[in-house]
Amino acid sequence: MLMASVLVAGALAVPLWRIDLIAPQYPEGLGLLIRANTITGIKPQDLKSINGLNHYIGMAEIVPESIPELRYMPYILMAFAGAALLVAIRANRTAILSWLVAFGLLGVAGMADMYKWGYDYGHNLSPNAIIKVPGMSYQPPLIGSKKMLNFRAVSLPAAGGWMLGLAGGLAFAALMVGRRRGTVAALAVAAAAAACTPGPREIVLHQDACSYCRMTISDARFGGQVVMRTGKIETFDSVECLVSWRRTADTTAIAGTYVMDLEHPGTLVNAETAGFLRGATVASPMGGAMVAFATPAAAATKQSALGGTLATWDDLQREPTTQSGVGSP
Amino acid sequence: MSKVSTGRVLIGGAAVVAASLLVYACAGGSGGASVAAGDAAARVYVAPGSYDEFYAFMSGGFNGQIGVYGLPSGRRLKTIPVFSQYPENGYGYTEETKPLLNTSFGMIPWDDTHHPALSQTNGEDDGRWLFINGNNTPRVARIELTRMETEEIIEIPNAAGNHGSPFVTENTEYLVASTRFSVPVPNRDVPIGDFKKAFKGQISFVVANEPGKMRIAFQLVVPGFSYDLARSGKGPSHGWMFLSTYNTEQANSLLEVNASQNDKDYVAAVNWKAIESCAKAGKARPAAAEYMHNYMDEKSRVAKSERMTSVPQLTPADCPGSIYFMPTPKSPHGADVDPTGEYITAGGKLASVIPVHSFSKMTKAIEGKEFAGEIDGIPVLKYESTIAGEVTNPGLGPLHTQFDDKGFAYTSFFLSSEIVKWNVETREVVDRVPTYYSIGHLLVPGGGTSKPTGKYVVAMNKITKDRYLPTGPELTQSAQLYDITGDKMKLLLDFPTEGEPHYAQAILASKIKDRQVKFFTLAENTHPQVAKTEAAAGISRQGRAVHVKMTSIRSHFAPDNIEGVRLGDTVYFHVTNLEQDWDIPHGFAVMGNAQAAELLIMPGETRTLKWVPTKVGVHPFYCTDFCSALHQEMQGYIRVSAPGSAVALTATLSKPTTAPAPAGNK
């Protein structure tokens, strides 16, 4: 419960929720962060840009100062953090349960409130709107993804949201300590969390282009894919390109990184558990001679035939990418 | 205990709900990696020394010029200055070209070019001329395509914002020029609040097929809407011009909202053949109007400017049957006619469908008087009576449509940043591709004519962002080339474009390539100050004006030493390029010239630089175009003396002499 208290207090400092608006003409991204006490853009000017876009469809301007909940929310969270601290000191099961139920109710109320605001913004459109599409409303999804005109809106918890969720989970675990069903419950929570990692999609040869070098991907033995938390997919024609791209990318926005398995062309494997050979005698598209295998063991097996040095995903992050045409000596 | 169990069930249930929400959250579609056809590089590669298949002429928007590009390579070949001064070659700075930029407002060195239009014969691009509008100060220019130079500009009176212009008729009988801003006609000092009472639109038809004689044949005064893009009828609909309109609300403030209230505005169908008959029958009145007509004399290559004082004007009431309104959703931008001439489509910027009107239904509706009302005596046809069908759920913000040779239409969508391909007969969407980013106009070579080609569509985008190496806050504009030979459009190429291209035209290179002028024939040069030989060069004084007739040939000017000029004089350098060889222009620039740029003189041509010296002293001049091995030696001096000086006026070129051997050379 002590941890829960710290997490709830910590959630005050970081965004609780994140809404990404994805459209072709915003390659740099656009979106909102909902914090306990205000709403801001993901980038400083995003809120202004979004209000500018919304005026076309007659949506009211989003003015954080006009949303009273944002004034109470920090105090409510502080109260819950304080209460969790008291419960931690008392360590009383009834107290834990009471806290948990109240916290759950807060979550439900918070979500309901967010839904209500989303509904109001999405439906109460000016009768003088410039663009009126019959039957169209613009309520963002409470959680998940929704296509609205040319935008796809993705609404997901941000760090603070996950921290609050985890706080609830920890309180739940505290309640279940010593009970067999606790294990089951913990597994259920873990499974639910795991279900959220967006998976890779198939790379379409001769169609998908490398997000780093912009060349079209034409060899299924090489390359990889990065899945962003927003669901956006970045594709790569070689592991070198992926590694180079990742150096300048916002890695906190990455949900998963996958690489092509040399032994099973077209199959994407999780980069973090994959094995790599550097300077192998296989010429990869960008000349870096960097190839991936499903496991480090598979890479080791192939080392005798292909040469090169063994590496893990972490090794690749630390060392500069080989860019010579002949690979490492 | 029971309390605890209930709590557990509640929490367990919440966990299940949360888990399913999370799974749902993950089901969102994937974002777009950029996608190009696998063999794209080969499809756009034009080998060294080989030529592109098409010339593309892209308007430069706010640079006031036209960019000439090759397709499919996207290579830029030339900038044709039209309404903007161009220091690179002296256009608009030389005495010969300055008159082209005269307007009734004075000499205006800039404009905003939007819509190039190739001349047509039997509804096909014929490659004789290219016309383009000046949007800001209403003008239309004619570019001669054998020289790719601007040779004629006519101002449009009673217009403001010449946006819906120029669109040519099937045999270039006329081009249309309509007004974007309705203004008081004639323009006078009235309160802006009197908009609905005093402000009028106009649709002008300009005689376009007589070089040097562009003139307004007749001007139709119409309700005070905003007239937007246009396209002439073809085949069965030849004789008609279709123009989109918006702000039929007639708002004069906050148009983005107040001009977006009507669910339908109109496509104006104008029967210009009927108006032509009415004008011939004396129904058009000469209305007082001040505007300029400027044109280049072909042999002397000197432009003249003439002030016009009247325009033949008539109203729809003077000529019944001359114009009808077809209701069209919502704030339409493009109005486009398919190659058969039967279908008229309009891109409603704010509409959720693409309406397709039928010309044959329209003529029947006019015969049957299927009118929904009347505006200032102009019949409004019933929507159901003219509409052939609607393309439903096409995308967001349709703007412009081009056609191919297989019965498909390609419509640009600004808001959803894509090109949507649809079947003209069935109105079914068959394909869509993203553009990068926010496409405006699009171009299929011949895509607005009776004979479209079916190889490429070019997207001209309004937003560039991350497509090229960044260059500070101001980025180049971006175009994309797509292959349209198959069922699916395929992205082939990104290429940067200069200015801000709006519409463009493209024509098979074979139609104009072999007619390109390589140089001007010196013997035919009738410029009043030409010097066809070095012997004819010289200097003369007329009061405070000094005229220097000068020649240039590799690698010297004649004369190259000029004396006797006094401060307070105005010097005119008339430089004739004596070369008669392909691609040997000479340049001419003089130090301290605050009034003009340089001269870039084509072989056989004479160009004049006006120079008002501001300092006593000796000033060099030199050739600016690397013409030969001794280009650096191609130079001269002009001596400027104090006012009242007695230095004789001379212009000399020394005879070749045998120089003494330099000291120390043994």
Image (cartoon, coloured by chain):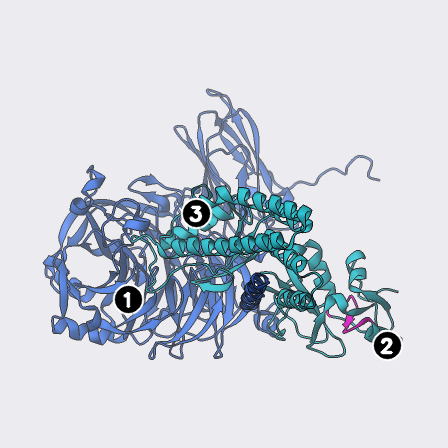
Q: Is residue A62 above or below residue A198?
A: above
Look at discs 1 and 2 and give the one toward the viewer: 2
Determine if residue B516 is in view.
no
Q: Which residue is mark 1?
A: B232
Magenta range is A285-296
Q: Nearer the viewer, mark 1 or mark 3?
A: 3
Numbered badge on residue B277 = none
Q: Quadrant of residue B129?
A: bottom left
**Chain corresponding to cyan in the figure:** A
Q: Chain of mark 2?
A: A
Q: Nearer the viewer, residue B423 or A187?
A: A187
From the viewer's perspective, is residue B624 above or below residue B509?
above
User: Residue at label 3?
Assistant: A62
Query: What percent of the width, then of the height, locates residue A58?
Result: 35, 52
What residue is shown at x 27% (from left), y 69% (from top)? B233
Q: Nearer the viewer, residue A237 or B541?
A: A237
Picture colour for chain B: blue
Q: Secondary structure at mark 1?
A: strand
- Gap between marks 1 and 2 measured at Cα: 72 Å
- A208 to the left or right of B153: right
Residue drawn at (56%, 43%) of the image: B557
Question: Label 3 is placed on what type of residue?
Answer: Ile
- Residue at 82% over, 39% down: B665
What residue is pinned by disc 2? Answer: A301
Q: CA distance from mark 1 to mark 3?
A: 46 Å
Q: Along the polypeptide, which appears first: circle 3 or circle 2?
A: 3
**What's under tag 1, amino acid-wise?**
Ser
Quarter of the image where the C terminus of chain B is located? top right
